[in-house]
Amino acid sequence: MPPPVAAEEKALRIAAMAVAIAGMVQAGEALNAAEQPVSICMSLGPDLQPLAAAEKLASKMFAAIGVTVGWPQGRIPCPRERAVIIDLSYRTADNDHPGAWAYALPYEGSHVVVFWDRIQLKMPATNRAQILLAHVLVHEITHILEGVNTHSESGIMKAHWSDEDLFEMMKKPLSFTASDIRIIHFGLGVRSRTGGTPAASK
């Protein structure tokens, strides 16, 4: 999850998104799930099993809100020019986004960095680490799809998960708020029309 941004900048970004959504609705353009599947480029590296399991859970979490994501692997080339690109960090420096498990670049529009070593340190058990990784992936990919760096008061898009949230996600995936679902589909609509990312249309 990315570091906090200045309150004024955050407010301006939220206002800009609200204006954009209002304009789309007024123009009569539907915000729906009938978009092209989103390609996610992430190398599985040496941790094939837990990473593949995390991908599968992340896909289910997005499918629950009508969003299809694909993870091209092996001989299938990943269309990096339109994909969400995820880099895994195995040796993260202490001064690199201290305390964070990942960060996204939603205004750049495609890149995510996940601190896999920190996730494994938090959840030494492989089955728990892959569940936390799936939630981190969904959180950061959502920032890219929404095109904004904002957070919600509850659920998958909270800025910081409590110990209770971590306990709950081990039993059942955290959910999206209705507002996040709307903004995700708005962002998907922009990606579909522009052939790029929400940020590309600004």
Image (cartoon, helix red, strand yellow):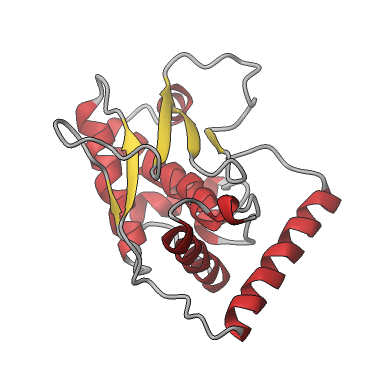
- Measuring 31% from the left and 63% from the top, which residue is drawn there? 63
Residue 57 higher or lower than 188, as above or below? above
Relative to 41, 193 lies left or right? right
- In front here: 8 or 38? 38
Q: Tell me residue 140's x, y (percent).
A: 50, 45
Relative to 86, 93 lies left or right? right
- In front here: 178 or 143? 143
Q: Tell me residue 183's x, y (percent).
A: 55, 66
Residue farthest front in this picture? 194
Residue farthest right in this picture? 8
Q: Quadrant of residue 126?
A: top left
- Measuring 25% from the left and 33% from the top, which residue is drawn there? 50
- Measuring 41% from the left and 36% from the top, which residue is drawn there? 85
Residue 19 higher or lower than 119, as above or below? below
Q: Tell me residue 12's x, y (percent).
A: 80, 58
Residue 177 higher or lower than 46, as above or below? below
- In front here: 185 or 99? 185
- In front here: 128 or 82? 82
Q: Quadrant of the N terminus?
A: top right
Q: Tell me residue 47's x, y (percent).
A: 25, 24
Q: Quadrant of the C terminus?
A: bottom right
Relative to 15, 164 lies left or right? left
- Measuring 30% from the left and 60% from the top, which residue is drawn there? 68
Residue farthest left in this picture? 75
Tag count in the figure? 0
